[in-house]
Image: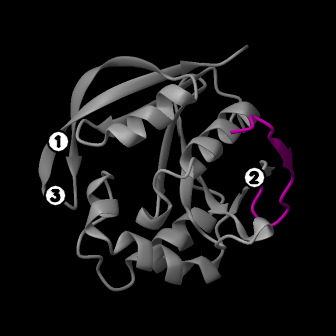
Amino acid sequence: MSSLAFASADHGTGHAVIETERLSLRPLRRSDVGLIAHYTADRRVAEGTRAIPHPLPPGAAEAFVARAMDSEGGEDVWAIDGSARGLGELLGVVSLTRMEDKQSELGFWVGAGFWNTGFASEAVAALVAVNPHGSRTLFAEVFQDNPGSARVLTNCGFAYLGDAESWSVARNARVATWTYLRRMAE
């Protein structure tokens, strides 16, 4: 995996398009709704996140894209797009949510067909390298039954911080998590 990442302005949304060796991280667009609905309808994808319900209710993907396209929100969401390399137009998403004191929380998911391809690690590494929020600290958490996502974080320089619990909408339950931290250069 190359750590090469560079950003260019996207004047439609206010956040950068980030290029890597195989991927583009770009703002979501309305045409992404179908693939988001398709991938997140998979129970395994939904249960790997805190906020994606299962089954996915009608209109949920549309509402997610609309919120992501709203430049006033505290969360910036990028599509993981492989179309420039002959891959899918949307493989998953990666996001940063602003927190207080120059901190952000990182989140990501990829469609189950793209697990174990390195796409998640490449997307997260690119977002960390560009640091579009200018954060001094990034946080992330994964469910303890998802060691693949934990490997993505450790591969990208995140350090284990501790155990916690978070609510999973898809599981309708509190689930044990591992929390990670990445200090950024100031």
Residue 125 versus residue 86: which sits nearer the camera? 86
Work out how far the residue at label 3 is from the one at label 1, CA to CA, in angstroms: 8 Å
Give the spatial CA distance, label 3 vs label 2: 32 Å
Q: Is residue 125 above or below residue 167?
A: above
In the image, what residue occupies the spot 21% across and 62% down?
A: 170
**Which residue is located at x 44 percent, y 33 percent?**
151
Q: Are marks 1 and 2 in contact (CB under 8 Å)?
A: no
Q: Residue at x 80, y 40 (%)?
A: 5
Residue for badge 1: 175
Does residue 148 show up? yes
Say what secondary structure mark 3 lies in.
Answer: loop
- Asked whether the residues under the numbered discs 3 and 1 touch, taking CB atoms below 8 Å apart as contact, a structural biologist would say yes
Label 1 vs label 2, nearer the camera: 1
Side (left or right) of 24 relative to 40:
right
Residue 91 location, x and y as percent? 57, 65
First of labels 3, 2 by sequence position: 2
Number of the label disc, if any, that sits on residue 171: 3
Q: Which residues are magenta?
A: 1-15
Verify whether residue 14 appears in magenta: yes
Quarter of the image for the C terminus: give it: top right
The amino acid type of the residue labelled 1 equals Val
Choose the circle earlier in sequence order: 1 or 2.
Answer: 2
**Is 106 located above or below residue 46 in the figure?**
above
- Farthest residue to the top: give it: 186
